[in-house]
Image (spheres, rainbow, N blue to C red):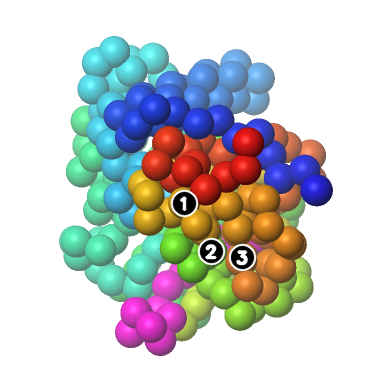
């Protein structure tokens, strides 16, 4: 089987959240020490929320120099930043408001704008900050029940995104557009961390992590950092169908 990254299993969602928050701080401290800044692309959804909330509380809140932390987003729904479905709104409420990070260090995707325009503007922002081959210190990802990650959904050949950093995605099943970073960006990162929890993810995790490679069916299998570290942090419930 091709190397699909390290996989670590934790007893429950609470221990998983603590671990994710600790990993965030550890990678952030190392990045600041080595490169003078910590550039991280956050994932949305419910799974990382508990970890984000821990980052906004003691003792973790003061373990990073937040002036050296630069927040980006792996994807965003095309909704205003005040909408309950907004990944930015979730992160802002979970920890960004609590840690004293400078406003200029938080780079949201403008979900209220035309999707294509928002994607192009975010790609320009990333190129300005990190160059045409951007290397994030950490990209956080989730795993959807259909095998999607970020807003890379089944049915799209991986080579679709070979030349772009960010693209707009029409998701008819959800009745909305989304904006996402592409596999090119994900696979340039120093660290990519998948966070997966819950029994409803057990079947798809086993298929993605241990099944045949079919990235058109399971976009999460596109993730394979070229010169970085891929880690899966999962709870017992999500790991239930993995072979030992």
Which mark identifies residue 128? none
Separation of marks 1 and 3 at Cα, in angstroms: 17 Å
Disc number lying in front (1 or 3): 1
Is 63 displayed left or right of 229 in the figure? left
Among the 4 quarters of the image, the one containing residue 71: top left
Q: Is residue 123 above or below residue 159?
A: above
**Crowd band around label 1 with a 10 angstrom C-alpha radius: few (<14), some (14–19), many (20+):** many
**x%, y% of residue 74?**
49, 55
The residue at 51%/35% (across/down) is 233
Marked residue nearer the N-terminal end (2 or 1): 2
Please give the residue where the numbered disc 2 appears in the rendered image.
Answer: 147
**What is the span of residues highlighted in magenta in the rendered image?**
171-183
Separation of marks 2 and 1 at Cα, in angstroms: 11 Å
Q: In this view, does 142 lie above or below 234?
A: below
Q: Is residue 110 above or below residue 171?
A: above
The residue at 61%/80% (across/down) is 155
**x%, y% of residue 13?**
33, 34
CB of mark 3 within 8 Å of CB of mark 2?
yes
Separation of marks 3 and 2 at Cα, in angstroms: 6 Å
Among the 4 quarters of the image, the one containing residue 145: bottom left
Which mark identifies residue 219? 3
Marked residue nearer the N-terminal end (3 or 2): 2
Please give the residue where the numbered disc 1 appears in the rendered image.
Answer: 202
């Amino acid at each position: 089987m091709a190397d699909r990254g390290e996989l670590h299993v934790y007893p429950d969602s609470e221990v998983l959240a603590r671990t994710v928050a600790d990993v965030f701080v550890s990678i952030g401290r190392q990045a600041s020490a080595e490169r003078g800044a910590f550039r991280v692309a956050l994932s949305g959804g419910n799974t990382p929320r508990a970890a984000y909330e821990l980052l906004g509380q003691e003792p973790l809140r003061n373990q990073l120099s937040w002036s050296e932390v630069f927040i980006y987003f792996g994807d965003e729904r095309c909704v205003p930043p005040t909408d309950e479905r907004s990944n930015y709104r979730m992160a802002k409420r979970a920890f960004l408001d609590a840690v004293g990070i400078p406003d200029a260090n938080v780079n949201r995707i403008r979900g209220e704008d035309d999707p294509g325009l928002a994607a192009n503007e975010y790609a320009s922002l990333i190129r300005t900050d990190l160059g045409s081959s951007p290397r994030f210190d950490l990209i956080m990802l989730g795993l959807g029940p259909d095998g999607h990650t970020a807003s890379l959904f089944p049915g799209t050949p991986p080579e679709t995104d070979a030349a772009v950093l960010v693209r707009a995605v029409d998701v008819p099943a959800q009745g909305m557009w989304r904006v996402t970073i592409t596999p090119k960006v994900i696979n340039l990162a120093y660290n990519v961390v998948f966070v997966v929890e819950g029994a409803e993810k057990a079947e798809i995790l086993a298929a993605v992590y241990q099944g045949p490679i079919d990235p058109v069916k399971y976009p999460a299998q596109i993730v394979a950092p070229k010169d970085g570290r891929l880690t899966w942090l999962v709870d017992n419930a999500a790991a239930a169908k993995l072979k030992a």
